[in-house]
Image (cartoon, helix red, strand yellow):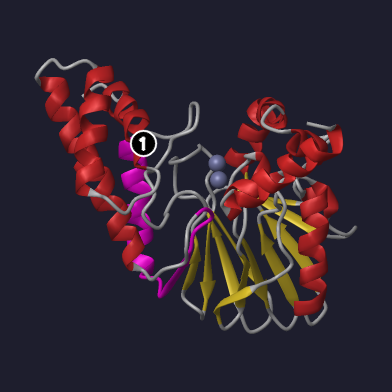
Amino acid sequence: MRKANFMLFVLMCAWALPSWAQSDASLLPETTTRVSEHVYAIMGFPNIAIVVGTRGTLVVDTGLGPRNGETIARVVKKLSTGGLLYLTTTHFHPEHAAGEAGFPNGTILIRDRVQQQEMEAHGAEMITRFSQQSALRAELLANVKMRQPDISFDSEVKVDLGGVTARLLWLGEAHTKGDELIFVEPDSTLISGDVVQNKRVPSIYGDGGTPSSWIGVLDKLAPLNPRHILPDHSDPGDGSLIAQDRAFIVDLQTRARALKQQGVSAEDAGKRLGDEFKTKYPDWPNINAVAGFVQRVYAEGR
Ligand SMILES: [Zn+2]
Ligand SMILES: [Zn+2]
């Protein structure tokens, strides 16, 4: 096959792939959907929330690298009515935090203290890991440096955006140690990071939380009784996502503990529960992640 023909063949193969496989989904689109009166979302990797008030705008998460941050900044310019621009990040992972440099000068960066410490301990190592995943990711993350926040907080800070208030919360460890959750009032919209997802097996990163600490965070969230939930890596839903997530974790934790008590190895339990949960939760797309979570239950030592 001549070189030009071969290239055409390669392009045609790429064309035939499903849309999710065509790109590696690292670039955010400029389109938005409306989640609630003051909350817009760019649906991508990850979903980005934009909370618009009369006095200011809050963006939650940055996308992977400054180029995605610039995309969000262009969208913000169209949506916002002026005033201050705030940026916060749900956790330190690169697709959530490494695009900060793409935001305009004067952007007020806020995050919880635990997350900042975790970023300083593990941020560079995660950027290296993501850079090895594809050439595009390496390009997007080249020379990224994380800066100190302008405002940091322990458990809660309120940002009055004019007609709408965002409560930035740290409620404990789950997907990471520093998971931040954002509750928007009066919309009753929860921006739930990687902590509350829509039919996704939870994943605990590195020395992040434990299954029990994750349940503890969900129990603190439940009384907020949100009307809308915007997760980072799945479709928006209503407040029932919290109970759905909790029920799944409790189910998996209970089954894994039972097998542990019977003397089944963590590896075998992962395989068995992987099969069992595939049947039990057929519409959860990442059900293969069950085995990883089972290891976490075993590691909890009960
Ligand atoms: Zn993450
Ligand atoms: Zn994530």
Give, as a single range, the part of the protein colored magenta: 211-233
- Residue that badge 1 annotates: 288
The residue carrying mark 1 has its beta carbon less than 8 Å from ligand 2: no
Depth order, front residue of 244/159: 244
Whether residue 89 appears in magenta in the rendering, the answer is no
Up-down relation of residue 279 to residue 267 (above or below): below
Up-down relation of residue 62 to residue 201 (above or below): below
**Residue at the (77%, 71%) spot, across then down:** 76
From the top left corner, tell me how far across and down residue 106 is, in percent: 87, 60
Toward the left, the furthest residue is 262
**Residue at the (34%, 59%) spot, across then down:** 242
The answer to whether residue 96 of the structure is visible from this angle is no
From the top left corner, tell me how far across and down residue 111 is, in percent: 65, 50
What secondary structure predominates along the stretch shown in magenta? helix
Q: Quadrant of residue 232?
A: bottom right
Whether residue 217 appears in magenta in the rendering, the answer is yes
Depth order, front residue of 119/238: 238
Q: Residues within 10 Å of mark 1 (few under 14, many from 20)?
A: some
**SS of the residue at dot 1?**
helix
From the top left corner, tell me how far across and down residue 49 is, in percent: 62, 65
